[in-house]
Image (cartoon, rainbow, N blue to C red):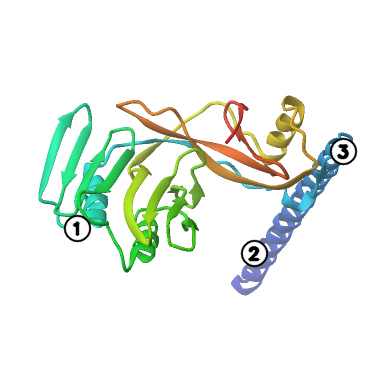
Amino acid sequence: MDRFRLKNIIILILVLVNVSLLGSLAIRERAEYSARRRTSEQLVALFAADGISLDPDIISTEVPPASRSLTRDTALDQKAAAFLLGRILSSNDKGGGIYDYTSAVGTATFRSNGTFDAASLQGPLAKADALDLCRDFCRKFSYSDPVFQLDENGTGKATAAPLCGKLPVSNCSVDFTFSEGALIAVSGTLLPGNYVELSSEIPPLSASAALITFQEETFAVISAVTDIYLCYELQNPTPSSITLTPSWCIVTDTAKYYVNCETGNITTN
């Protein structure tokens, strides 16, 4: 057999193998799609039996991420303090993981569990550009867009949720306090970017499993589930550790509920 004919035979065999693999992949994808559709239909029927509407299109197919253990970053603390206070004149290690930073504008205290407070000593932290400074802080230090609740005089608060990657962290925030358009105080949680992923032998709950857990274990008076999405929950931090665990946020017409992807525990806030 000449080399040209042998080459053509090999090419034909490779083409047939690829077609076979593509066919197997298409069959598997159709089977997975059909299984997801059946699961969605069963969930819709399960909730409907309790008088709760559930749109099958909101049932996510995302895979929850691993839990994360965060490591304190004092350099990040100092950058946040300088952003709010301007040039830092002094810093003080008070022990127990607590650091104070002072400028001509005000003081800030950062703790090892991620919480912090910053306030002016005399005059505001920001005045003419207070709202922009608030937005810039959130962009620079990984928070969602702030939500402002100010009266006609510019007095009130703004709140934003920390982000870990692209996911919100549900049970902590940063809060900005305004008085007559001036920013006078900032407090909340600053999450460090350094982390290690924590392994688990237990597969995380899917969105479908979280919905089933929610339906079986809560007695909430609701009439509709309007959304479900992944987020993190901050576990009770200690002086030596900050841990985030993945959860499904189930949004209803009355409240938001959080189903821990590892334990199945349900919380609301």
Residue tagged 2: 10
Q: Based on the displayed image, in which of its 4 quarters is residue 205 positioned?
A: top right
Rounded to the nearest angstrom, the CA distance separating label 1 from label 3 is 55 Å
- Identify the element where label 1 is drawn: loop
Disc 1 marks a residue whose amino acid type is Gly
Dot in front, 2 or 1: 1
Q: Nearer the viewer, residue 91 or 162?
A: 91
Label whose residue precedes the other's in the sequence (3 or 2): 2
Q: Is residue 263 left or right of residue 188?
A: right
- Identify the element where label 3 is drawn: loop
Rounded to the nearest angstrom, the CA distance separating label 3 from label 2 is 61 Å
Q: Nearer the viewer, residue 179 or 103?
A: 179
Eyeballing the image, is 42 above or below 87?
above
Does residue 194 show up?
yes
Mark 1, Cα crowd under 10 Å, few <14 / some 14-19 / many 20+, is some
**Circles 3 and 2: CB atoms closer than 8 Å:** no
Circle on res. 86: 1
